[in-house]
């Protein structure tokens, strides 16, 4: 149970629902609630399916096929997550969509990937499955996606009470958390890689 809670909290931080608040507010201003809600469910479903599939098959794909150490994968995910966090601090929400664009056209890319889940979430799901088992990893991914849906729906329901300036500040603060988590992921991966190198030597 401790492993589940720890991995769940970490994945929710990686997904960072706060960073999606401004996007939801912007979409709701241009599209009817029904279309936005449909996108929320379909996009999060795709996010779960893709991340869940990688959690199940990722260890085989990276370790057996590509001969990549999972700590190297975690390092790559941490670097990308840190870059995303830096972008959110300096620019705010990075996702944009064309005016009049059908929201269902963006439900997989870029809404599900990389807006909801991306390389850092994938690497976390894969390493969770490798260290704690596939069932726990799937439960963590499913619970994190459900939490993301709840927070997205809450944002949609309460958007009329939200000040865009406050949302912008929140996105940048969440970017700081994202940057910190990414750097921590990278640091831990480097420590493990150095430890493995010393053992081999």
Image (cartoon, rainbow, N blue to C red):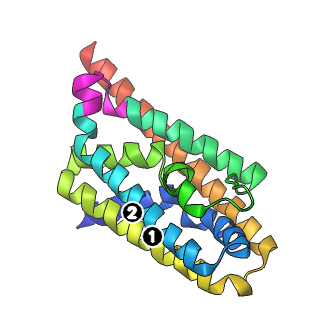
Q: Is residue 47 above or below residue 156?
A: above
**Residue 27, image x and y in percent?**
67, 69
Spatial CA span between label 2 and label 1:
6 Å
Which residue bears the numbered disc 1?
41
Q: In this orientation, which residue lies closer to the viewer: 87 or 184?
A: 87
Q: Is residue 127 above or below residue 23?
A: above
**Residue at 44%, 65% in the rendered image:** 42
The secondary element bearing badge 1 is classed as helix
Q: Relative to 59, is 100 on the left or the right?
A: right
Q: Residues within 10 Å of mark 1 (few under 14, many from 20)?
A: some
Residue 45's label in the rendered image is 2
The image quadrant that residue 159 belongs to is bottom right
Magenta-drawn stretch contains 46: no
Q: Relative to 38, is 164 on the left or the right?
A: right
Q: How many callouts does the rendering have? A: 2
The secondary structure making up most of the magenta span is helix
Q: Are marks 2 and 1 in contact (CB under 8 Å)?
A: yes
**Residue at 75%, 60% in the rendered image:** 99
Residue 159's label in the rendered image is none
Magenta-drawn stretch contains 68: yes
Q: Which residues are magenta?
A: 61-71
Q: Quadrant of the N terminus?
A: bottom left
The secondary element bearing badge 2 is classed as helix
**Residue 8, image x and y in percent?**
36, 63
């Amino acid at each position: 149970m401790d492993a589940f809670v720890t991995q769940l909290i970490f994945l929710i931080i990686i997904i960072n629902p706060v960073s999606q608040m401004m996007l939801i507010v912007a979409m709701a201003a241009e599209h009817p609630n029904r279309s936005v809600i449909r996108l929320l469910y379909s996009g999060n479903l795709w996010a779960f399916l893709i991340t869940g599939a990688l959690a199940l098959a990722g260890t085989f794909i990276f370790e057996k096929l590509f001969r990549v150490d999972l700590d190297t994968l975690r390092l790559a995910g941490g670097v990308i997550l840190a870059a995303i966090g830096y972008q959110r601090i300096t620019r705010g929400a990075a996702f944009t969509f064309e005016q009049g664009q059908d929201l269902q056209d963006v439900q997989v890319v870029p809404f599900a990937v990389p807006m909801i889940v991306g390389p850092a979430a994938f690497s976390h799901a894969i390493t969770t499955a490798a260290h704690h088992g596939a069932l726990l990893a799937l439960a963590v991914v499913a619970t994190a996606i459900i939490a993301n849906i709840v927070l997205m729906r809450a944002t949609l329901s309460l958007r009329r009470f939200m000040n865009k300036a406050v949302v912008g500040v929140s996105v940048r603060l969440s970017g700081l958390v994202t940057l910190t988590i990414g750097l921590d992921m990278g640091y831990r991966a480097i420590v493990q890689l150095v430890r493995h190198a010393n053992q081999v030597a």
